[in-house]
Each structure stands twice: as C-alpha cells, then as structure tokens.
Image (cartoon, coloured by chain):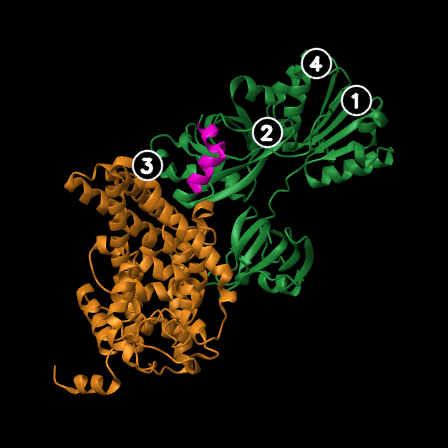
C-alpha cells in the first residue's frame, strides 16, 4: 500500500473530514425529499408488480410484473435499506428511517447486517482475516489463502452465491469456516440461527406461499414471478457488490499493518481497498450509489445520492497525495472481478506462469 | 374503519410479515400522503385550520386531528411533530381549549408563545399556515381538575395560562359550583392571553373569581406576594394549580407551603423554555438512563458511551468513532454536543450516537 508519512496521513484526514463536515452541515430538505421520492418509487413498483403478477399468464404482463417487483427489491435493498441502515438518514428523526430499527426486504435480518456490514466490514475493510466479506469464505481471491484442489471449482461457488445471494448474505454471520475449524461452536450460533430462520421464513412465506396462494388458481405463475424477482435482485446486487472490493487494483491489507491505525490511515485503506464504476443515473440509483464505493467507504453515513457531487473532490485529493483512484466502466471492472475469481482458482504456480505470459 | 383493521391481531401479524415493520399500515403512506396528507398512518395527522394572534408573540393554532386521535382531559399536553428542513422535530404543548370542543367540533387548540432562539416555535409562527398537516401525539399529563367539585386556586404566569384555560372552560361548562379563583400574572396588559375568553368566563360562571395582574406596570415590578394570597377566601381549603415560569412556580409553592398547604394539594406543570446554548456553558450534567433506572452525574468532555460504561451499563457499540451507528439510541430529553461535528442537538426526543455525544446539561436516555 501507499506509503504516506504520518504528517501526510494527518493532512489527508483533515482534507477528507472537511468534505464530510461540509456535507453534514448542508443536509436538509433536499435530501429528505430525495429519499422520500425513492421510497415512493419503491412502493409504486412493488404494488404494481404484485398487482400485475396474478395476470402473468399473459407473457408480457409476466415480464413486466417480475421486472417491476425485481426493481422494487433492488431499490429497497440498495438505495433505501443499505443506506438507511448506515445511518445516512438518521438526522431526519423519522422512526421509519432509523438505522438501528430498519428492516429490509431480504432474508438477512437488519441486526445481522448491521453487525457484519456496518461494523465488521466497514471497520476492517479488506483486512485479510478480519473482513469476512473478502471472498465470503467461499472464494479464494488472493494468495493470502493457501490453494487447495477444491478451489479449482470455485466458479461454481460464485454462480451459486450469486443466484442465491440473499440467502448467502443472510447466513453470512454463521461463520461456517470458523465452525469447521472448531474455533466456535454451533451452540454459540443458536441465537443467530433463530433470527435467521425467523426472517428467512418470513420472506419465504411472503414471496413463495402467501402471495401465490392469495390468487390461488394462478399460484404457480405468481410463485414463478416472485422467484424471478428475487433472482433478478440477487444477480444484480451480487454483481454490484463484487465490483466494490474484488477488482484488479483493489488492495488488501494485513492485520499487522492496521494495528493502532490512525484515522488518516483508515481513510487511506478505505480509498485503496474500494473501487468505483461509471454509468448513467439509472445505474447509480439501482446500485444504491455503490458505483461510488470509494466515496461510500470514506463517508458511509453521508446520504449516498451526494456521492456523485463529492467524487470530484475525492479524486482531486487522491491526485494530490498520489493515491490511485480505482474506477472504470461497469463491464471493465466486472471483467477484472471474473478474472480474479478464475485466476485464484488455479494453483499459484500455474497462475504465475499464466500472468507471466504476454497478454 | 381503518383503525379496526389496524387493531385486528391477525392482520397486524400478517402486515408485519409482509412489510417488515411494526406499523404495517404505514407502508402505504408514501403513496397516500401525496393524495391527502391526512391519510397517513405512521402518526396521527392534524390539519391546521386557523391561526389567530393572541398577543404580539403568542398565537393560537386551531387543529383538526384525524378522527382516531384519542382525545384528552383538560390540563393535559401533547407532543407535536413537525418536519422543518427535512428534520422531524418533536415539541410538547398544552392543549388550550376544553375537551368539549374536541367532542363537539373535532377541533383542538394550541396556544404557543414564540421563544427567543427556539427553532420550532419561531418556525411555527413564521411558516406554519392553514392547510398544513403536522403530527399529533396522544395526550398525556397529570395536571387534572378534581373529580368532585372542591375549592380551587389557579396561579398562572404568561403562557402558563394555556392548560388552565382548558380547565376553566371545562369547569364552567358544567357550572362547577365550588369557588374557583385565578391569579393570572402577565408582564404588561399587552401580554394578556385570551383576555376575551377569561372575561366571558367571569360573566357566565358565578363561582369564578378572576384577577389579572401586570407585574411590570409601575416603578418596581410587583410579583406574587402574601397580599394576593390573603385576598383569596378559604385559601387553606383550596386545591392549588400552578403553571408558569420557574420563578413564579417556586415562589408560589413557597408561599403556599408557608400557609400550611401540603404538597398533595399543589399541582404543577410547565415546560421549561429550552435554554439557549451559551458559549460559557460547561459540558457534562446529570445523565439518566431511564430503562436501567440509573442516574449519574458526568463532567467535562466524556462521551455518553463512556459515561454509560462507567455506570456499569453495557450499551451496544461498534467502531466507537461515530461511523457505524451501532451505538445509536434515543435521547428523550436534554441537549448533547456531537464531538465529531461540534453540533449541538435540540432539546427534544431524537436518536443520537452515544460514542460521539457529550451531555450539555441534564440528559435523559432510553437505555
């Protein structure tokens, strides 16, 4: 990682803090209006999707309904849920938008997400051994993990994880790798499993039992549509999320490097461990502005719709300190993620030989 | 009708499964509010019907709450929620009309004085207009008229007359026959609130005696004193109700104690004007953790998280640097400073991050 002096790190901290303070002071009507508009959009899409679904025996209506419901889930998970739970709208003092009580439309409970994402992932971003999001314990993405033959099939893991992403995220806190290594016992995970079963059961009941049975004669159609909507959300969100920290230039860190970390160093780690991708306004909305993963990691509790405005200033700061600002096209960044997954499924020897070959 | 749906346990359970929230009906608010703001379910909406000036700095806001509002007893107060510049602010005010008005016309009134430096009262005076919709909480408060008629003395100061107005009009309507005296202290004649209503009461209600006293006429200010109390017949037998600025309430309580009136016959209610944040104010103060029933006194720049842990509580926390919001909890009252931003919070109920909040005066936390 960049070697900045302590003095430089202090200056970096000051410069980034200045942006944060400025935005915080500016929060008000505009931001409230924005999130309420997005919520209105979500409600409209979900109502439209669910109302249309029983009429899905007409193929175009099925496509429209499944797409509407899929988009509703995407927006609720990414632009609304993820951002609200980060505390981005706590200042509004609206009980329905409180970070600590918001519950989102996906299998993962809000509490589990707050623990594993807000706290663990954002504090230990890309620190090998501490940030369990790095590979989600089912993918080898760097040589910090020793290769074994099972890894050669990890692309299957990737596909399964993407297809069933909401369940993967929901059960992430189980820490199966630590259970296997007997570092923790199943008994320790019982409270979590109870929470997971309750929320997972609730979501499955809603999408796969209640709504299908509500319009009984067309139950299979509604069921298929709801499965489709969840699948759309799973594939989209896993793709967006993987582009956040697994792109080629995204750096990883050791625990030792980050001991007694200063705020300036934390900022630097967030800047170099995250990656952006470009796109139109729709892409930014649907990605919950995780297209600005760098800005998000530097300022997780600023309303995400502000990231596009902040981005030029963050880029300027990076240029000044000689820090690489990791961005590219969505397809480009995603390509490097796929490459990484494939590369590290190979033994180190094979991988190095392939890398040594001219492109 | 919608309330019946809301109260059905099966439907509520179903709503929670489908919408992932404790108030499932409110899921549709974002779609209903643009159609008609009175349709929201997240809180009880009340539409501003009329605004009238009482004095130069006091206005009466007449509100029409949604039918499902729970009503009130004379002397109680409500917490209103108002969105100002994207933020929801909660403030508590006394209801200044009789419950009969709610029962007969479906209307209630709040008589609100503009507080110097107060965010909400100034905004209400300057920007709230008829047609606007605000949130109205359920009425609460123990400042209630006696169940059976007995002699009563009201001592009011300034805008403290508001809950007492509610009580007087209620008592007058039922021709309360025990003697009732009101000593109403104002600074000048121009500061008398509801003068017309008070005089009307005096005309139509024989048991009622009214004394309005301007403290600032004359060379020296004339506050409540023994002479005023001497003029009240049968003082010792009276049940006393006090509402006004802290100084008046303390003075009145002392004088009444001296006359042998016990605390169980003295009822007080008031909302201290939020203290304007002075630069010289020191940090720290008494912190009460209401759920744990623990009260401690803190000094200096210690964060509420550290204060809680020093008091042997174990609140949830995460990064301890104001980023992850794991330590976020509800402050029910009091002012805190955010160590990260330097901003001072409001005095009302809001969520704060324990790890970066420092108390500035007494603070109440739901912890």
Q: Is residue B100 visible?
A: yes
Query: Mark 2 sits on what residue?
Result: B95
Are dots 3 and 1 on a single chain? no
Q: Position of residue B148 (x, y in %)?
A: 76, 21
Q: Position of residue B284 (x, y in %)?
A: 64, 59
Are dots 2 and 1 on a single chain? yes
Q: Quadrant of the N terminus of chain A?
A: bottom left
The outermost residue toward the left is: A359
Mark sitting on residue B151: 1
Q: Magenta-highlighted stretch: main secondary structure?
A: helix
Marks 1 and 4, how far apart at CA? 13 Å
Q: Which residues are magenta?
A: B2-16
Chain in green (letter): B
Marks 4 and 2, how far apart at CA? 21 Å
Mark sitting on residue A214: 3
Query: Mark 4 sits on what residue?
Result: B175
Q: Is residue B224 visible?
A: no
Neighbour tally class for label 4: few under 14, some 14-19, many 20 plus, Cα within 10 Å: some
Q: Are circles 3 and 4 on residues that touch, CB within 8 Å? A: no
């Amino acid at each position: 990682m960049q070697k900045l002096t302590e003095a430089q790190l202090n200056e970096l901290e000051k410069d980034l803090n200045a942006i944060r303070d400025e935005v915080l002071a500016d929060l008000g009507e505009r931001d409230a209006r924005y999130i309420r508009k997005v919520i209105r959009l979500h409600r409209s899409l979900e109502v439209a999707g669910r109302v249309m679904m029983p009429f899905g025996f007409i193929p175009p209506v099925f496509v429209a309904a499944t797409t509407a419901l899929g988009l509703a889930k995407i927006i609720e998970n990414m632009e609304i849920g993820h951002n609200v739970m980060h505390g981005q709208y706590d200042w509004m003092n609206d009980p329905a938008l409180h970070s600590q009580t918001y519950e989102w439309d996906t299998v993962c409970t809000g509490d589990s997400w707050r623990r594993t994402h807000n706290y663990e992932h954002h504090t230990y971003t890309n620190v090998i051994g501490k940030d369990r999001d790095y590979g989600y314990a089912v993918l080898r993405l760097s040589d910090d993990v020793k290769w074994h033959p099972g890894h050669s099939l990890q692309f299957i893991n990737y596909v399964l994880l993407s297809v069933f992403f909401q369940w993967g995220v929901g059960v992430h806190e189980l820490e199966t790798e630590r259970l296997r290594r007997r570092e923790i016992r199943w008994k320790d995970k019982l409270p979590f499993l109870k929470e997971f079963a309750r929320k997972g059961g609730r979501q499955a009941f809603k999408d796969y039992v209640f709504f299908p049975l509500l319009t009984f004669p067309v139950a299979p159609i509604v069921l298929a549509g709801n499965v489709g909507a969840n699948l759309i959300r799973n594939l989209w969100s896993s793709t967006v999320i993987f582009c956040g920290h697994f792109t080629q230039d995204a750096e990883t860190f050791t625990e030792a490097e980050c001991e007694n970390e200063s705020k300036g160093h934390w900022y630097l780690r967030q800047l170099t461990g995250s990656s952006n991708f470009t796109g139109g306004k729709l892409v930014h909305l649907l990605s919950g502005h995780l297209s600005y993963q760098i800005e998000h990691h530097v300022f997780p509790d600023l309303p995400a719709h502000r990231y596009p405005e902040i981005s030029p200033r963050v880029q300027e700061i990076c240029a000044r300190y000689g820090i690489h600002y990791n961005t590219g096209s969505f397809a480009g960044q995603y390509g490097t993620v796929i490459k990484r997954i494939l590369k590290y499924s190979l033994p180190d020897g094979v991988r190095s030989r392939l890398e040594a070959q001219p492109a | 009708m919608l309330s019946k749906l809301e109260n059905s346990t099966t439907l509520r359970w179903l709503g929670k499964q489908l919408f992932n929230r404790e108030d499932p009906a409110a899921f549709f608010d974002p779609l209903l509010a643009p159609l008609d703001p009175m349709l929201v379910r997240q809180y009880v909406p009340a539409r501003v019907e009329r605004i009238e000036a009482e004095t130069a700095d006091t206005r009466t806001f007449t509100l029409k709450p949604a039918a499902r509002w729970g009503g009130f007893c004379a002397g109680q107060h409500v917490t209103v929620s108002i969105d100002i510049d994207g933020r929801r602010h909660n403030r508590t005010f006394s209801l200044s009309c009789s419950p009969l008005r709610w029962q007969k016309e479906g209307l209630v009134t709040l008589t609100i004085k503009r507080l110097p430096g107060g965010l909400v009262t100034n905004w209400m005076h300057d920007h709230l207009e008829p047609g606007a919709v605000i949130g109205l909480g359920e009425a609460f408060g123990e400042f209630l008229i006696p169940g059976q008629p007995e002699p009563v003395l009201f001592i009011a100061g300034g805008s403290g007359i508001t809950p007492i107005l509610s009580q007087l009009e209620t008592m007058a309507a039922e021709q309360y026959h025990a003697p009732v005296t009101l000593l109403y202290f104002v600074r000048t004649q121009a500061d008398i609130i509801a003068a017309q209503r008070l005089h009307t009461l005096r005309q139509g209600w024989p048991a009622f005696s009214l004394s309005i006293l301007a403290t600032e006429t004359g060379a020296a200010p004339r506050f409540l004193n023994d002479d005023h109390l001497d003029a009240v017949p049968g003082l010792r037998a009276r049940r006393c109700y006090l509402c006004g600025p802290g100084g008046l309430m303390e003075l009145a309580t002392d004088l009444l104690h001296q006359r042998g009136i016990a605390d169980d016959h003295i009822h007080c209610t008031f909302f201290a004007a939020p203290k304007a944040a002075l630069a010289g104010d020191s940090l720290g103060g008494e912190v009460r953790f209401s759920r744990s029933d623990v009260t401690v006194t803190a000094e200096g720049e210690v964060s509420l998280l550290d204060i809680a842990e020093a008091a042997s509580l174990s609140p949830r926390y995460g990064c301890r640097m104001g980023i992850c919001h794991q330590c976020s909890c509800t402050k029910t009252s009091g002012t805190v400073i955010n160590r990260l931003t330097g901003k001072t919070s409001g005095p009302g109920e809001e969520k704060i991050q324990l790890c970066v909040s420092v108390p500035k005066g007494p603070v109440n936390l739901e912890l």
